[in-house]
Amino acid sequence: MAKTSGSRQAAWEFFGAELKRHREAAGFTQAELGMRVFVSGAYIGQFEQALRKPQLDAAMRIDEALQTAGFFERMWRKLIKELPYTEYFAHVADLERLATKLCEFAPAVVPGLLQTAEYARAVYLASNPLASDEYIQDMVKLRMDRTPILKDATRSLYCAVLHEAVLRTPVGGPASMARQLDHVVAMVRERKALVQVLPFSAGAHPAMGKILTLMEFGDAPPTIYTEGVLSGNLLDDPAVVKRAHAHYDLLRVAALSLDASLALIESAAEDYKRCASTT
């Protein structure tokens, strides 16, 4: 297993402190270095304060601008290697904890933040059928370690649009799926999440087949995350983010109301319970 999140944060703070030290030694302001790295000066400041982690290409450009002979690239690779998540998701896991608002669209599976351990185990087993029990348990624990984001007193606003296919796919079997949907219902009723369902009858939509996460922050620009097969993209270009928000707005318009969505989720859960009782 990887280091604790506290030690990882301390390591990123060291990255930021070294960045500031080298930048000042080179005589650059944050804005001047940002121009050379192709990010804003504000972003350089966020890197230095460990509020955001640079992408690999940014770390490499920092080395080039500051003539640090690959120091920041090597540090970046070391820190990412020690993260418990896959490289393409590591930044997202960090940003989730900082976000003031999280909005997700799930076309096929329940989003990770809403999953039960039983459902998560079935998802991991489906993609890793020959993995050891220890590996699967570790992966499930990592996923469950993210869920307190929605439960603590300072939690972010969380919204999710689930395609109806998510409700109709019996991941882990009928009994497991019933418990998963009951959990989603409980999160809604406890006012920890706003969940809508995009019904099959909605037809085509702007995010077909795409996992989409929108994140907003109190002191930083918004960003979006999209995910495919064994890959993910974290994007913060303002024009791209604006377009993604427009797509999400269209999804919410096409989705059932909050009350109708809750009723459909509850109905699907009852269907799974009846199915489980007859097998």
Image (cartoon, helix red, strand yellow):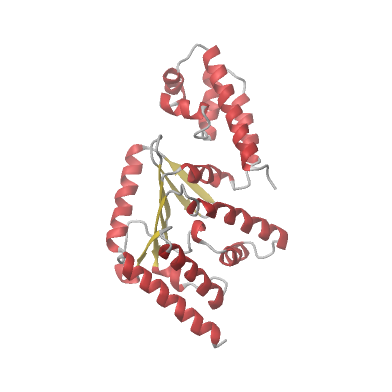
Q: Position of residue 211 (x, y in %)?
A: 44, 55
Q: Position of residue 238 (x, y in %)?
A: 34, 38
Q: Position of residue 131 (x, y in %)?
A: 69, 61
Between 245 and 94, which is closer to the camera in this rendering?
94
Q: Position of residue 12 (x, y in %)?
A: 59, 32
The mark total stands at 0
Left-right relation of 219 to 116: left
Give the residue displayed 51% in from the left and 69% down from the top. Answer: 180
Between 173 and 192, which is closer to the camera in this rendering?
192
In the rendered image, the quadrant that contains the C terminus is bottom right
The residue sitting at the front extreme is: 153
Tell me, yes or no, if residue 275 can be seen here: yes
Between 171 and 239, which is closer to the camera in this rendering?
171
| Above or below 154: residue 256 | below
The residue sitting at the bottom extreme is: 278
Give the residue displayed 52% in from the left and 26% down from the top. Answer: 48
| Above or below 120: residue 36 | above
Tell me which corner region of the image, top left, top right, bottom left or bottom right, holds residue 207: bottom left
Give the residue displayed 68% in from the left and 42% down from the top. Answer: 3
Tell me, yes or no, if residue 132 can be seen here: no
Tell me which corner region of the image, top left, top right, bottom left or bottom right, holds residue 72: top right
